[in-house]
Amino acid sequence: MKDLSTIISKFNIQGTVDTVAPLGAGLINDTYKVTTREADTPDYVLQRINHAVFQNVDMLQSNISAVTRHIRQKLVEAGETDVDRKVLTFVDTAEGKGYWFDGENYWRVSVFIPRATTFESVTPLYSRFAGQAFGNFQAMLADLPETLGETIPDFHNMEFRLRQLREAVAANAAGRVEEVRYFIDEIERRADEMCKAERLHREGKLPKRVCHCDTKVNNMMFDEDGKVLCVIDLDTVMPSYIFSDYGDFLRTGANTGDEDDRDLSRVSFDMEIFRAFTQGYLEGAKSFLIPIEIENLPYAAALFPYMQCVRFLADYINGDTYYKIQYPEHNLVRTKAQFKLLQSVEEHTPAMREYIDGLIG
Ligand code: GN1
Ligand code: MG
């Protein structure tokens, strides 16, 4: 890998690079914070794009620039102040491109948003803000003029994810299938129900809309006062069911434990977070949601722990080729934690329905 300062020098940044240090905890790309020496120049975020995962970098960057341009325009039209902290700004290379290829890796640079924080878990109040923010994000993109490409084809297609798991099981590349038989069976038992979104879509009942598709709680920047500034990690913004954004936030934000908790007694679904987030989300998104989307929000809350369980398990069976891991059985630990979360979501489904019915009247 090339020296990071050399890579940064390919971009039109202001100021002199002072430090470059790893940033965040993403499982796919490598991210660094670049500080500059001068007081009046911004700091930056440098990312190495995981090219094995995002195979069409041109499509990726053109999606992102369409989305950020559109959001910026909406913010300006709405008379927002502090626009530069409410939408990401990407920096071009000297040749005017949105990324730089060093012969081996693809890199991009965005402006670091000052005085903002990310969280790994949130209070009910912050979840409500997060719900509004993701609802607004979808609402702002509802009239995006460009048609976005699928940066990862079939990314949140449950039928596809199950197919991948079944292929992994059939190949048994790492010899791990026997050890995880229990989880495979539990997954198969729910497979039909969990593919409901794909069926509804084929029947013409469920639309795709522009979604974020990685609404983990830590993909949101909060201001010092707890207000959401903006949504980051825009690689997966693409057409999907609104379930993606609603469900993936709850998978992370409403989990009382960690995504990869070894202590399963810590993992459960927090109904208080669910209520606050749902309330905020419906405030932000009610202008465009149709009844079938609202009715299926409890399904979405189950779908994402389920899908993540399938994805982590498939990766474990394949011998850990997709997600970054910190120790050999990490993907199995993640699978177990997501399965425990799914069970907790299932227990709370009737209460979720009741709450949503009450909200929409
Ligand atoms: C990945 O890169 P990161 O950590 O934000 C993954 C998501 C998963 C998530 C699980 C492109 O997101 O889909 O939900 O890990 N992104 C991709 O933590 O696969
Ligand atoms: Mg992320």
Image (spheres, helix red, strand yellow):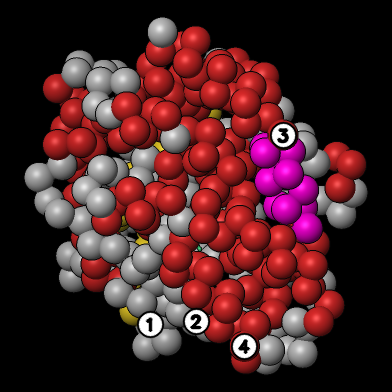
Question: Residue 25: x percent and y percent?
Answer: 64, 54
The structure residue drawn at horizontal position 60% and vertical position 82%, both measured from the top left corner, is: 168
Q: Position of residue 1 (x, y in %)?
A: 53, 83
Q: Dot 1 surroundings within 10 Å: few (below 14), some, or many (20 or more)?
A: few
Front residue of 43/100: it is: 100
Q: Secondary structure at mark 3?
A: helix
**Marks 3 and 4 close (CB-CB < 8 Å):** no
Distance Cα–Cα, label 3 vs label 4: 32 Å
Give the magenta-colored segment's residue range: 336-346
Write down the residue under mark 3. 347
Query: Magenta segment: does it hold 344?
Result: yes
Is ligand 1 closer than 8 angstroms to the Cβ of mark 1? Answer: no
Q: Residue at x 46, y 11 (%)?
A: 359
Whether residue 80 is situated above or below residue 112 in the rendered picture = above
Three-letter code for the amino acid on which mark 2 is drawn: Lys
Q: CA distance from mark 3 to mark 1?
A: 50 Å
From mark 2 to mark 1, how far is it between C-alphas? 8 Å
Instruction: Give the label on residue 102, or none.
Output: 1
Residue at x 56% of width, y 16% of height: 355
Tell me if residue 137 can be seen: no
Q: Give the residue type at disc 4.
A: Ala
Q: Earlier in the sequence, mark 4 or mark 1?
A: 1
Residue 113: image x %, image y %? 45, 38
